[in-house]
Image: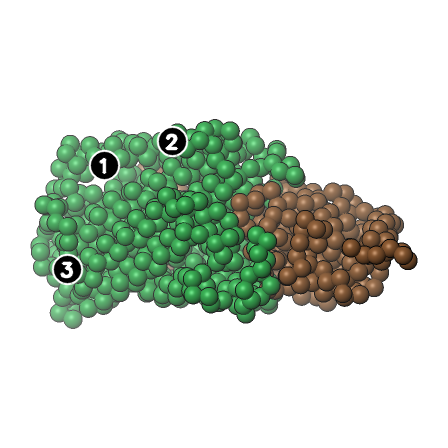
Chain colours: A brown, B green
Amino acid sequence: MNWLPPNGELHGITMDAMLRWNLAAVFWMFILAQILLVVALLRRKPATDKRTKASSRRAFLFAWLLPLLAISGLYARMAISSRRLWAARREAPASSRPVEVEVTGVQFQWYFRYPGADGIFGTTRAALVNAPAGNPLGLDPRDPHSRDDIVSSLLVLPVEQTVEIRLHSRDVIHGFFIPGMRLKQDAIPGMTAQVRFTPVVTGEYPILCSQVCGLGHARMQAHLRVVSQREYRDWLAVREHARLAAESPGPGESQP
Amino acid sequence: MNTKVGRFQLFTTDHRRIAVRYLVLGLVAVVIGTLLSLVMRIHRVWPAVAFPFYGTLRPEDYLAVVTMHGTLMVFFVLTVVPQSAFPNLVLPGQIGAEQMAFPRLNAAAFWVTTASLVVLLAAFFAPQGAPISGWTSYPPLSAIAAAGPGQGTGMDLWLWSIALFCLAAIASSTNLLVTIVACRCRGMSWGRLPLTVWSWLVSSALTVLAFSVLLAAAALLLADRHLGTSYFLPSGEVVNGLVMRSGKGSPMLWLHLFWFFGHPEVYISILPGMGLASSLLANFTRRPVPGYRLMVGATILIGVLGLGVWGHHIFVSGMNPYAGTAFGLTTLAIAVPSSAEVLTWIGMLFRGRLQPTTPMLFALGFLSFFIAGGLTGPILAQPALDSYLHNTFFVVAHFHLVMAMAGVFSVFAGIYYWYPLLTGRRMNERLGQVHFWVSLVAAYGTFFPMHLAGLAGEPRHYAQLSGPVASFANLIPVERGITFSALLLATAQIVFLINVAWSARRGSPAGENPWRATTLEWSPFPHPIARGQAYSYGGSAERDFSPQWQETGAGPVFEGLKKAPSPSD
């Protein structure tokens, strides 16, 4: 179980514990079954043994029905525990106002957009997409809400605060995968997926693409940096300032 | 018993000759598919290696190899051999029919399958090469030629190949369904069918349903590519710097259509192996299958439930989370009849004296892999856990064990077991045992460690383990071990090929019923009548079986036979 990468997410603790007992249960069932196969292969037994009705009823009960009920019970237990965790992660409403970040996958890059001081994501248009000119998401400059939006290729998040990701793709299906947050969600063009998670340990976590998306699929990687709330505010403030300085030129200057 | 396949006839309608052709087709596909997997394994651990006649692999080449490997193996090996070759070889015999219901449709299906394989392989020679979107071909990557190399002509060829394959599969399975329903010989009531025939009944019904949907999906995707429709394309697509025409479709439609086919496909390729395992375990322990009706019921239940679990492939696609829960429950439910079958098989091993012949060893191997791969199914069935494990090597390990290795080992069991039907000779036992043990160890060595890579979060379809995030560097030793095991696994198959060729001439003569089997494909009579249950083993030590073609009373009296329907029904 040391194979799992370090977990930094609130529900990830529960998930790791669940995965651990699930793996242990099926591992020992696997070992038991393989032992039975080997024993059956090595066993030497006279070919003629008379079975009575009572002995075959016993065999049916103890070698078939009861194990099957036990195994079915295990599956039911898995279904229930997994249902609880899934509900907590994907269905529960946010307890407090979450940090909102829009994540967009494009071949072969992740972009992270923060709504800025107004807290509203501005409109984007496909026709305006122009990565070389610094507008990879097609932000519409005419929309006032777009002016303070921050676009980053690094995902920076505050610790111990719930994050709501709005996941998009502009071209093909990508898979947004942060192993350290135990989070995976496909970015499907034409749809917005909303997923929430709560980082609880500061540090750097890799972000991968988990759905084959073209020749650069394997290098479609990014970083999540989980920082203290204070560092997060500072990081945002610096970028907001730079963004506004670039967007609203001082008096006398003309915008190109 | 017609033991020899005679003179070559191009358009033969003889089902045994068609079976041999399907086996050759499967062999061509499995050789190419295996070589492609070795290319992947070698590239992953030694990325600088130059391959003969090609050179070093580019990232898009790796993805093309993944795509072609998966397509060849799933369609042309794991579907063609259990679902087309084997039923052509023995199904008419097992139900006492002289011919298939539609011999010419059956022959046509073979040639369409061959055309499908040729079209698929032609994709290697297309401009920009073979498609790179994986065997699942999710749009928009598969819908827009500009989305990557190989997504132009290569992708078109892939889609045409799949469409042809669907047509052939539907035709071939319709033939099997009608043959089973309408062509059974006198006395072959439903309760006397071998479990292989029950498996083919269920898998053929699944094939007709699932491949029809895949055919429709392929047609819609071709329309999106060439007719300007947008079934799978939303508006606002920007691919390769180009703004695509607007559409109102969704890639989600493909995900649902594809997996509505894709999951039953798993059962299409594994159900025949399950039926064969039951038959071989009965034969080589000389005991009947206990709970025949339960086994039939479990097979049908797996088929029916198998149509309602496809959503577990797309838990993280943005499907409603409640739908995820529902599909998780149906998937855990299908594990119950599967577990029931496994418990029956294990029970069967302890009833009589086990004869470790090569076909029996491969049946045990099937069982071993079916358990190993099957047990991770309930883990992946849980959306909460799958949302971490999805598309990692854990899934690769899961389906290579439960579908690929279990499937291939049951295919080997079938070939070793039915070889005398075609050649009149047995395959060499010693070579068979070497083939089995080396393959078993190497297959576990290849696929078991992939669970660990998956737990570490390593995604599928990554040509390299490095990149901006070098988080998988510590997996390199595991990866290297997997590659060495894969090379050993492939090498062991040379022993099998030598055995097939050598035994055809030098194998020991098999005689009429070499395995002392009960089912009708071994009957010496051309027009048999079924006079008893499929698995009448046991009885006295001198005569421990009663073939279905034998007059009741000539052999030992079995408890189950007393209530059996009379031969005239």
Chain for numbered disc 3: B
The answer to whether residue B448 is left or right of residue A88 is left
Q: Nearer the viewer, residue A192 or B285?
A: A192
Q: Which residue is mark 3?
A: B99
Q: Which SS class for mark 2?
A: loop
Q: Residue at x 29, y 46 (%)?
A: B26
Parent chain of label 2: B
Asked whether residue B559 is in view, the answer is: no
- Residue B476 location (% of width, % of height): 56, 32
Amino acid type, mark 3: Gln
Residue beneath label 2, please?
A: B53
Q: Where in the figure is residue B218, as x and y percent of width and height? A: 40, 61
- Label 1 vs label 3: CA separation? 26 Å
Question: Which of the labelled discs sits on residue B500, or is there none?
Answer: 1
SS state under label 3? loop
Q: CA distance from mark 2 to mark 3?
A: 46 Å
Q: Earlier in the sequence, mark 1 or mark 2?
A: 2
Question: Is B310 on the left or on the right of B183, as rendered?
Answer: right
Q: Which of A232/A46 is in front?
A: A232
10 Å neighbourhood of mark 2: few (<14), some, or many (≥20)? Answer: few
- Residue plotted at (48% across, 47% down): B149
Q: Where does the image place residue B340, in percent across and percent down from the top left?
A: 41, 57
